[in-house]
Amino acid sequence: MTNSTHSIIYLELNDSLFVDEEAAGREEPFEAFTMTYFSDRVGSGFTGQFGVNRFTKSDGLMRHVHLSVDGKRFVRERILILESAILLDVGGKQLVIMPNTLCDIGPGVPHMWRGLPAGMLLPNGTRHSSESVMVFFYQEEVQGFERVGGPEILTVPEEVASHAGDMPFPSVTENDVLDMPFIRNGQLQYREIAIAQ
C-alpha cells in the first residue's frame, strides 16, 4: 500500500512553477523507501527532449524562449537542478536556484541561466561547488534557443522576431547573489547569514 506523506507545494512566478525538495511530494510505496516527486503523475507517454547540462564557473545562456519544431507554438521547459546552485532570470525576476529544485518554465517566458564560480557564498549560507548540474526536459522536440532581448512574456510565436536580441545574464558579484531570493518550502526566502564588513 502506498502511503502519501506530503503533497506538492508549488511556487508560481511569471507563469512558471517551482518546487524545491522540501516542497516536493513524497510517497512510501515500500517500507523504508520514500519517493520524492516534483510533479503530479499525468499521462503515460514520453515525448520531447530530456538530458543534462553542466555549468562551470560563470557559464551562461542568453535570454531565450523555446519554439516547437514547426515554429507554431511555445514549448514548456522543465529543469531540475541536481548539484550546487545556478542563477535564473525568469521573466525579469532573478533567483538563486538551489539543488534539488524543479523549474517549470512557462511557454513564451523569456529566461536565462548563469553558473557561479566555485566557493561563492550563497544566500542560504552554503558555498557553491565547482559545477551545477541541471536535468532538462522539453514536452516536445524544440527548434532550439530563440534569443530575445527583453523579459516580457510572449503570447504568440510571431512576437519572437520583434523581440529578438542578445541579452546575457549580467555579471554578478557575491553580494549581488547574496541579495537574490532562493526557494525553500515553496516560498521565496532571502539571505540567512550576516556578512562581516
Image: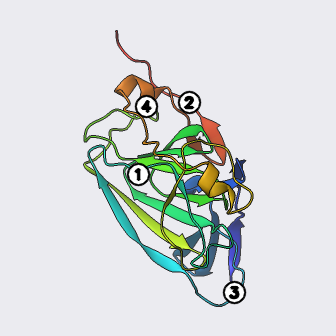
Q: CA distance from mark 1 to mark 2?
A: 24 Å
What amino acid type should be assigned to the residue bearing mark 4?
A: Val
User: Residue 45 location, x and y as percent?
Assistant: 63, 90
Per the image, the residue denoted by label 4 is 177
Q: CA distance from mark 4 to mark 1?
A: 17 Å
- Which residue occupies 53% across, 74% down? 142
What amino acid type should be assigned to the residue bearing mark 3?
A: Met
- Which residue occupies 32% across, 38% down? 127
Q: Residue furthest bottom?
A: 45
Secondary element under disc 4, as helix, strand or loop, is helix
Q: Quadrant of the C terminus?
A: top left
User: Residue 76 location, x and y as percent?
Assistant: 63, 66
Dot 3 surroundings within 10 Å: few (below 14), some, or many (20 or more)? few
Per the image, the residue denoted by label 2 is 190
Residue 82 is left or right of residue 161, and the answer is left
- Which residue occupies 31% across, 35% down? 120
Q: Residue furthest front?
A: 162
Secondary element under disc 3, as helix, strand or loop, is loop
Query: Is label 4 or label 1 in front?
Result: 1
Q: CA distance from mark 4 to mark 3?
A: 44 Å
What amino acid type should be assigned to the residue bearing mark 1?
A: Leu
Per the image, the residue denoted by label 1 is 61
- First in sequence: mark 4 or mark 3? 3
Q: Are marks 2 and 3 in contact (CB under 8 Å)?
A: no
Per the image, the residue denoted by label 3 is 1
Q: CA distance from mark 4 to mark 2?
A: 10 Å
Secondary element under disc 1, as helix, strand or loop, is loop
- First in sequence: mark 2 or mark 3? 3
Q: CA distance from mark 3 to mark 1?
A: 44 Å
